[in-house]
Image (cartoon, rainbow, N blue to C red):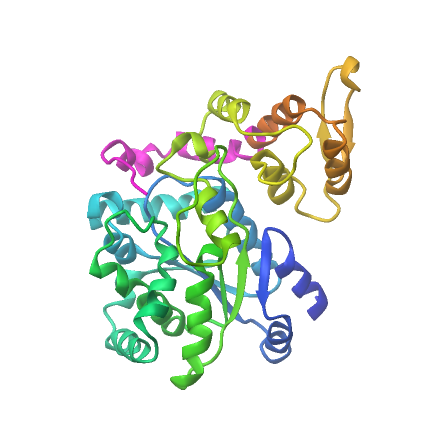
């Protein structure tokens, strides 16, 4: 596979931004198997964003010959008050995450627990050195990575989070940070402080945050409005009807999609369109078969460009789109439901703890 093909895999949706393409190309020219990572707080059930979207990008990177590391950020989740701050329950969720991605087709990734990183003296040295190269104001600008509003009782411990995440990058010896748009500020911080500390400037690849099924208000952080809008409106574990979870039953998927926000003729801020764009038709040669009654035009098969044109013109009705999106998601998530039907012990933790933001 040549470098251009590898770059196209990295650029494939839901990738939204690469900082920057020149550095990415140089990385492929100098390293046969660069290292990329994404980090996840094991904090609740996986939805389309955490599960399917992240799985797609992992597989894109692996196909491009990249060594992929997944940081299971158990202590970050503890700091962020997830699963009631119970580290044992957080670790159980981490095992569920690993099984979820495997059921979605992800193989050949290296899983690393944050609890293993923090056992290293070198890790804490990096945290301290990073902290000396930035300001309180800059750290505060990174706080959207927590997924909390400014009024949700942030503690002093939350201020440690950006420095910890920067240290993760350099302790894992990562060439590419592949995270959501909500993590952009901390990735830019890593690119800034890395050379100052004798490290490197990691390439940043940010993917789109899949919009939730219901409209939500902005979180109010002093960051780029597009990023704040994505963070505020993304699918959320703490708001079940805003998300399709990978373990939702077919009936539950149909119910959620049926009541989802989907304005006629409007693509902007349309969560059903986002599922079509970033999941169903994310590949250039992908097509989507939409079945509908003959009096409404009959069955059609569309590309993304055709879908967008027909929908904006009113030639595709939200009701027909929703019905077919539901059936697509039911089918693609079937292996996951089947896997966990036979491994119920991995999801028992969710019966014990209320999921929080």
The residue depicted at 29 percent of the width and 80 percent of the height is: 132
The residue depicted at 39 percent of the width and 46 percent of the height is: 97
Q: Is 353 included in the stretch rendered in magenta?
A: yes
Residue 281: % across, % down: 68, 42
Residue 173: % across, % down: 42, 74
Q: Quadrant of the N terminus?
A: bottom right
Q: Is residue 57 above or below residue 47?
A: below
Q: Write down the region rendered in magenta.
A: 330-357
Q: Is residue 247 visible?
A: no
Direction from residue 325 to residue 115 in the image, left or right = left
Residue 90: % across, % down: 27, 48
Q: Is residue 278 above or below residue 31?
A: above
Q: Is residue 341 above or below residue 76?
A: above
The residue depicted at 59 percent of the width and 55 percent of the height is: 15
Direction from residue 144 to residue 273 in the image, left or right = right
Q: Is 142 included in the stretch rendered in magenta?
A: no
């Amino acid at each position: 596979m040549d470098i251009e093909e590898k770059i196209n895999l990295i650029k494939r949706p839901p990738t939204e931004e690469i900082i920057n393409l020149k550095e990415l190309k140089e990385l492929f020219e100098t390293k046969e198997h660069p290292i990329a990572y994404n980090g996840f707080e094991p904090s609740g059930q996986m939805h389309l964003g955490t599960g399917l979207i992240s799985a797609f990008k992992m597989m894109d990177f692996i196909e491009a010959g990249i060594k992929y590391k997944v940081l299971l950020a158990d202590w970050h989740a503890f700091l962020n008050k997830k699963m009631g701050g119970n580290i044992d329950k957080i670790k159980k969720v981490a095992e569920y995450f690993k099984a979820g991605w495997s059921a979605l087709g992800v193989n050949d990734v290296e899983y690393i627990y944050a609890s293993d990183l923090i056992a290293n003296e070198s890790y804490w040295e990096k945290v301290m050195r990073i902290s000396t190269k930035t300001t309180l104001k800059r750290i505060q600008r990174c706080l959207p990575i927590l997924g909390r509003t400014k009024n949700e009782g942030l503690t002093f411990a939350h201020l440690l989070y950006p420095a910890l995440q920067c240290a993760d990058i350099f302790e894992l010896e990562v060439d590419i940070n592949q995270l959501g748009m909500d993590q952009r500020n901390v990735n830019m911080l890593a690119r800034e402080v890395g050379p100052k500390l004798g490290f490197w400037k990691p390439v940043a690849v940010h993917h789109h945050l899949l919009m939730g099924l219901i409209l939500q208000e902005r979180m109010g952080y002093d960051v780029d409005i597009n990023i704040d809008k994505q963070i505020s409106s993304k699918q959320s574990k703490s708001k079940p009807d805003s998300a399709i979870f990978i373990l939702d039953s077919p009936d539950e998927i149909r119910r959620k999609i049926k009541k989802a926000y989907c304005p006629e003729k409007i693509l902007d801020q349309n969560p059903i369109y986002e599922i079509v764009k970033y999941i169903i038709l994310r590949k250039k040669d992908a097509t989507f078969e939409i079945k509908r009654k003959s009096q409404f035009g009959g069955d059609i098969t569309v590309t993304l460009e055709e879908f967008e044109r027909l929908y904006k013109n009113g030639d595709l009705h939200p009701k027909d789109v929703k019905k077919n999106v539901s059936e697509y998601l039911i089918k693609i998530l079937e292996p996951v439901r089947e896997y966990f039907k036979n491994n119920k012990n991995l999801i028992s933790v969710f019966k014990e703890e209320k999921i929080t933001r």
